[in-house]
Image: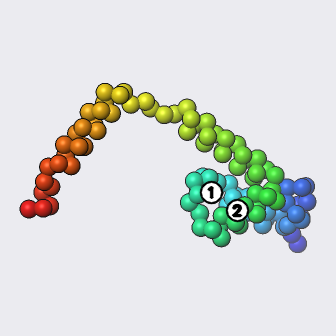
Amino acid sequence: MHEEQDRGDHKSVPFREAKSDCQEAIHTLYNFLDGELTGPRREEIQRHLDDCAPCLEAFDFEAELKVVIAKKCRDQVPEHLRERVYWALIEASKRPSARED
């Protein structure tokens, strides 16, 4: 006999199945956020998030954290270094490559 979970978190699914779905959804959150899942897998996780408030809350937190990190954790490259790299690449592209020999 399965324990039923009907707390608004899931739509009356067996507790073990719901727990497994949640663990899987949480485990794949970063892949979901990074767009690294196949279409069908993404839809499956999206359906779970639509039905599961705790997982959706975790997803929202991770999505917001990812945005904050992306905005705050950027190293600024000094302009003089950018110019040196740019000109080095220009000069390197003018030289015949070793493969052309």
- Looking at the image, residue 38 lies above or below residue 7: below
Residue 66 seen anywhere in this rendered image of the structure:
yes
Q: Give the residue drawn at x 88%, y 63%.
A: 11
82 relative to 25 in the view: left or right:
left
Q: Is residue 6 above or below residue 65?
A: below
**Residue type marked 1:** Phe
Side of 65 relative to 4 (left or right): left
Answer whether labels 1 and 2 touch (C-beta < 8 Å): yes
The residue depicted at 67 percent of the width and 61 percent of the height is 24
Q: Quadrant of residue 7?
A: bottom right
Say the numbered circle drawn on residue 45. 2
| Residue under pointer 1 | 32
Q: Quadrant of the C terminus?
A: bottom left
Task: Identify the element where label 1 is drawn.
Answer: helix
Q: Residue 43 in the image: state x and y as whole percent.
A: 70, 66
Q: Position of residue 41 (x, y in %)?
A: 65, 67
